[in-house]
Amino acid sequence: MRECSAILSSYSSLLFFALIQLSEVMAKCSCQVMDQLVYVYDEYPQSVENNYIPHCVVVRRCSGYCSGEEFKCLPTLERNATLQVNQVLFTSILTFLEHQQCQCRSFTENLIFLLNTRSKIISYATADF
Ligand SMILES: *[C@@H]1O[C@H](CO)[C@@H](O)[C@H](O)[C@H]1NC(C)=O
């Protein structure tokens, strides 16, 4: 009986720690830079499929929830990250676009952003709408 309640109480403490508070849930899924899985072949289609090892890499990209259908989570700052990957006989270096800052922008806000900055971000961002 005593053992049983000990097991029960440790189980309930497990349950307690497994509960992720709403504020944390909201914070984690809000528009921000996150680790994202990218298939090398998707970004380097000229390469022979599955020629690279690993087949996918993790890069930082904008993702997450914006309040309102009209808003999209889009980058405000980007950089190129250079990653080492293996090919069959040698190691090669590939460049992947990474997002460094994100923002929820509506279509109109994005057009204004487009006019104010003339970076490559724009064509990418507008293609998203
Ligand atoms: C990333 O590299 C591509 C290809 O060289 C270049 O066109 C682009 O401007 C670079 N982007 C950034 C943010 O440096």
Image (cartoon, grey):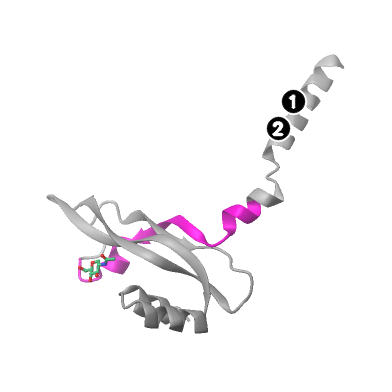
Mark 2 neighbour density, 10 Å: few (under 14) some (14–19) many (20 or more): few
Report if residue 107 is visible in the image: no
Q: Residue furthest right?
A: 1
Residue holding disc 1: 10
Residue at the image position 70 percent from the left and 32 percent from the top:
14
Say whether mark 1 is within 8 Å of ligand 1: no
SS of the residue at dot 1? helix
Q: Residue furthest front?
A: 116
Report if residue 110 is visible in the image: yes
Which of the two residues, 119 or 33, is positioned nearer the viewer here?
119
Residue at the image position 64 percent from the left and 56 percent from the top:
26
Residue at the image position 59 percent from the left and 68 percent from the top:
66
Q: Position of residue 118 (x, y in %)?
A: 31, 78
Which of the two residues, 110 or 57, is positioned nearer the viewer here?
110
Q: Is residue 30 magenta?
A: yes
Q: Position of residue 109 (x, y in %)?
A: 50, 80
Where is 5 relative to 94, above or below? above
Residue holding disc 2: 14
Q: Is residue 19 left or right of residue 66?
A: right
Assess whether mark 2 and mark 1 are in contact (beta carbons under 8 angstroms).
yes
Considering the image in quadrants, where does the N terminus appear? Answer: top right
SS of the residue at dot 2? helix
Going by the numbered disc 2, the residue's amino acid type is Leu
Which of the two residues, 127 or 54, is positioned nearer the viewer here?
127
Residue at the image position 43 percent from the left and 78 percent from the top:
113
Q: Quadrant of residue 100?
A: bottom left
Q: From which residue to which does the magenta span run?
A: 25-47
Q: Residue furthest top?
A: 2
Q: Position of residue 5 (x, y in %)?
A: 83, 21
